[in-house]
Amino acid sequence: MQAVILANEPWIRLGCAAALLLVMVLWESHAPRRAAAEGRLRHGARNLAVAALDVLVVRLLVPLVPAGLALVAAERGWGLLHQLSWPAWLEIGLSLVAFDFAIYLQHVTFHAVPALWRLHMVHHADLDFNTTTGVRFHPLEILLSLGIKLGLVLVLGPPAVAVVLFEVLLNATSLFNHGNVRLPVAFDRWLRWIVVTPDMHRVHHSIARRETNSNFGFNLPWWDRLLGTYRDQPAAGHETMTIGIEPFRRRDQVLFTKLLTMPFARQRGGYPIDGGEEPGP
């Protein structure tokens, strides 16, 4: 069963992501939370082009995906879970939670280390906030994140099905929580105890340093609440808050080619958790 899942893993992920992307785009068209800063077609095409490049780079440079490594680990008994005799459902559940916590820590680290922030600011430099923002990451950040996942597979030894399920959930929640969609306030307050909602994550994309360094969760919202990085609402309100980072405020600075070279620019965006000064040339 796991071998079948692994053989179809790329198509499973792509199919789920494409279906949800379509749903989110239609939802954004019907009930947007904010006015768009630029044309949706141009903005979405740019972000999806970055995502397509990410997939190409990973497929060309990385010979083994986390789910494949999980099968190798199972055969050779690598990882903590292979030393235990726990029920499969428990191992899958623990693996999902462990992977989600690792992604939270990774996200905080990419804000805290200036060199890593240079990569991550490509995601934050988006002048809009919609579902395509959820797939806009620099290829080098994607490769580093993949390396972290591979390391976690070796240490934890999760079932391959859990790894595939986590990847599907991570893609899905990233598309959802970056959505420019409107949820009833009461429903949002209830839902954000279970999953990161668009209103919760939008705070993280605020131009204000104290807000962008909060709400790091992608999937589960618990880590922010437990570790003191949760912020309920943006000070300026969702409709009027400024999205993005300084000093990348012009549209000509966020073109496709500019996004790829952005980490190597002299200006680094000024938001790593390093106590540094505000951005400057």
Image (cartoon, rainbow, N blue to C red):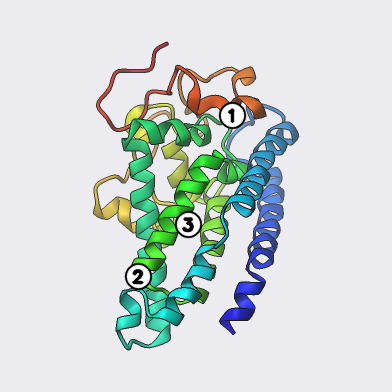
The quadrant in which the C terminus is found is: top left
**Circle 1 — which element?**
helix
At horizontal 65% and vertical 27% (from top left) the residue drawn is: 257
Left or right placement of residue 244 versus residue 235 in this view: right
Circle 3 crowding by C-alpha within 10 Å: few under 14, some 14–19, many from 20: few
At horizontal 48% and vertical 75% (from top left) the residue drawn is: 72
Nearer-N-terminus badge (3/1):
3
1 or 2: mark nearer the eye: 2
Query: As drawn, which residue projects farthest toward the top?
Result: 281
The quadrant in which the N terminus is found is: bottom right
- Name which quarter of the figure residue 14 lies in: bottom right
Q: What is the CA distance from the residue labelled 3 to the residue labelled 2?
A: 35 Å
Q: Nearer the viewer, residue 84 or 198?
A: 84
Left or right placement of residue 125 versus residue 23 in this view: left
Left or right placement of residue 75 versus residue 81 in this view: right
**Circle 3 — which element?**
helix
At horizontal 35% and vertical 30% (from top left) the residue drawn is: 114
At horizontal 69% and vertical 48% (from top left) the residue drawn is: 25
Nearer-N-terminus badge (3/2):
2
Left or right placement of residue 241 versus residue 133 in this view: left
Where is residue 116? Give x, y as percent.
40, 36
Circle 1 crowding by C-alpha within 10 Å: few under 14, some 14–19, many from 20: many
**Circle 2 — which element?**
helix
Question: Residue 259: which numbered mark, if any?
Answer: 1
Question: Residue 30: which numbered mark, if any?
Answer: none
Q: Amino acid at mark 2?
A: Leu
Residue matched to label 2: 156
3 or 2: mark nearer the eye: 2
Q: Amino acid at mark 1?
A: Leu
Residue matched to label 3: 187
**Mark 1 vs 2: CB contact within 8 A:** no
Q: Please tell me how many numbered marks the rendered image carries.
A: 3
